[in-house]
Image: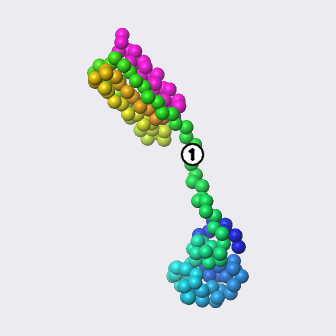
Amino acid sequence: MNGVMSGKQLFTVDEVAGRLNLHAKTVRRFIREGRLPAKRIGKEYRIARPALDEFAGAATDPRPEPVSRTRQVLVSSIVDVDAIGPEDSQRITTLIMAGLNSRRGEGDFPRVDSLYDADRGRLRIMITANPALTCDLVRTIAALADADRS
């Protein structure tokens, strides 16, 4: 018997007997003696696959089942805007965050943080998002920062 029996997780006494080439009475005796762990569900016993694998001495696959995932590409970027006052810094941050908040509910909601350093007159914006959105955000920040100089 190999470690990968099927996707099934619980087995009846008859199924276990068939898999181990034993009589069902023998399987029930092993359960009563505590040699084969089982749970009683109604009038029947159910044997979990890990308990059956261990009892049968089957080599279990140490690798966990793969997690289904959706591939995602993210970019982390830092945008520094120097020589900017606190009012302009607040305006740029507010406009960027308002634009992002309108995207709520979409699956690819980005992470954007901002920090204003008053001593240096610098706005730092940290972006983690998909490449296309990151490009759009960087262009928007550049356009807003250039508009402040005019």
| Residue segment shown in magenta | 130-150
Q: Residue at x 65, y 86 (%)?
A: 24
In the displayed structure, does residue 102 sit left or right of residue 30? Answer: left
Camera-nearest residue between 4 and 108? 4
Determine whether, in the image, residue 35 is placed left or right of residue 82.
right
Q: Which residue bears the numbered disc 1?
A: 70
Give the residue at the far top of this rendering: 150
Q: Is residue 149 magenta?
A: yes
At label 1, which amino acid type do we have?
Answer: Thr
Mark 1 element type: loop
**Up-down: is 57 above or below 145?**
below
Residue at 55 percent of width and 37 percent of height = 73
Q: Nearer the viewer, residue 135 or 117?
A: 117
Looking at the picture, how far across and down is residue 141, in whole percent? 41, 23
Q: Quick one: quadrant of the N terminus?
A: bottom right
Residue 132 lies within the magenta run: yes
Rendered location of residue 147, percent (x, y)? 38, 14
Let me know if residue 11 appears in the view. no
Residue at the limit of the structure toward the front, as seen here: 119
Point out the image quarter for the C terminus. top left
For image coordinates 63% across by 67% down, the residue present is 60
Q: Is residue 12 left or right of residue 39?
A: right
Q: Residue at x 58, y 52 (%)?
A: 68
Q: Is residue 54 visible?
A: yes
Of helix, strand and loop, which mostly describes the magenta segment? helix
Q: Quadrant of residue 142?
A: top left
